[in-house]
Amino acid sequence: MSYLEPSEFATKMVDAGESKIFMSTKDTFIRAFMAGAILALAAFFAITVMVKTGNPLIGAILFPVGFIMLYLMKFDLLTGVFTLVPLAVIDKRAGCTWSTMLRNWGWVFLGNLAGALTVAVMASFILTYGYNTDGGALAAKVGSIGESRTLGYKEHGLDGWITIFIRGMLCNWMVSMGVVGAMISTSASSKMMAMWMPIMLFFFMAFEHSIVNMFLFPFSMIMGGDFTVVDYLVWNELPTVLGNLVGGFLFVGLPLYLTHVKTSPERRSA
């Protein structure tokens, strides 16, 4: 395994954040669209496996395939740019500002959303033969997931909203560990190994991932889930996005930057 020292891959994280800020709008949107679509396909695949086998762990073991594919293609998820792009700003790289960071986040959000929605429509179409059947057990499962992870939280009021936020935070803590872990190695096989475990963990634990949810909840509504767009936005997507932002930046990007890029001088004995 070709291993990089933490100081080396931490600098790569800042470089990656800088390059994303200066990426063209076209490339930013296309890469985000593809990332959202591939992750949505992986979620569709994993849920299908769970329904057919009755074993959630098998679905969780297989879901990281989608994340690995999109990462190796250098496509961008909102969760990843939450972790990397702010580092270029706080490192005061030339031309990297809070406004350029927000611009990057905005285009990645729109691209991820467009990709996830596209797959949601295609998945619902093929599952129902053009909306001529009810979709069977898979549609029922997806509908129940959407209801339980919107209305289920809503029943608990503010505590439910905070629960989603924390689940989002824990999710991107793990997802970002996968992103950063892949930077430790220069070989494809080692990158895949580094990404697999944390992604499997977040999926099995049902932590909230904003991009997976951009697919899951619209898909659930099309399949008959009994909740509204407002329920989805207020009682899932919004707190999930905020939780993903805090988890990725505060628990992964910032600690690595502070201790491996801005390393403090060693203490001297008296």
Image (tube, rainbow, N blue to C red):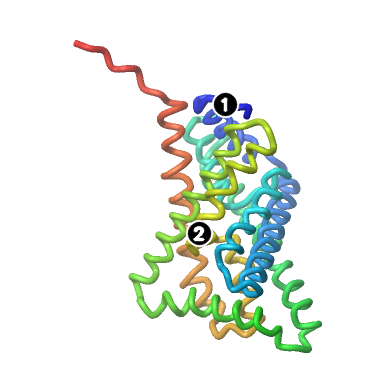
Residue 100 can be seen in this image: no
> Residue 117's image quarter?
bottom right
Residue 165: give its label: none
Task: Tell me the residue at 74%/46% (across/down).
Answer: 27
Crowding around mark 2 (Cα neighbors within 10 Å: few <14, some 14 to 19, many 20+) is many
Query: Which quadrant of the figure contains the N terminus?
Result: top right
Query: Which quadrant of the figure contains the C terminus?
Result: top left
Q: Which residue is mark 1?
A: 4
What amino acid type should be assigned to the residue bearing mark 2?
Val
What amino acid type should be assigned to the residue bearing mark 1?
Leu
Q: Which residue is mark 2?
A: 241
Q: Where is residue 62 drawn, in percent x and y?
A: 64, 58
Above or below, 195 against 118 in this view is above
Q: CA distance from mark 1 to mark 2?
A: 31 Å
Task: State left or right for residue 63 relative to residue 228.
Answer: right
- Which secondary structure lies at badge 1? loop
Tag 2 or tag 1, which sits nearer the N-term? 1
> Extreme left residue here?
270
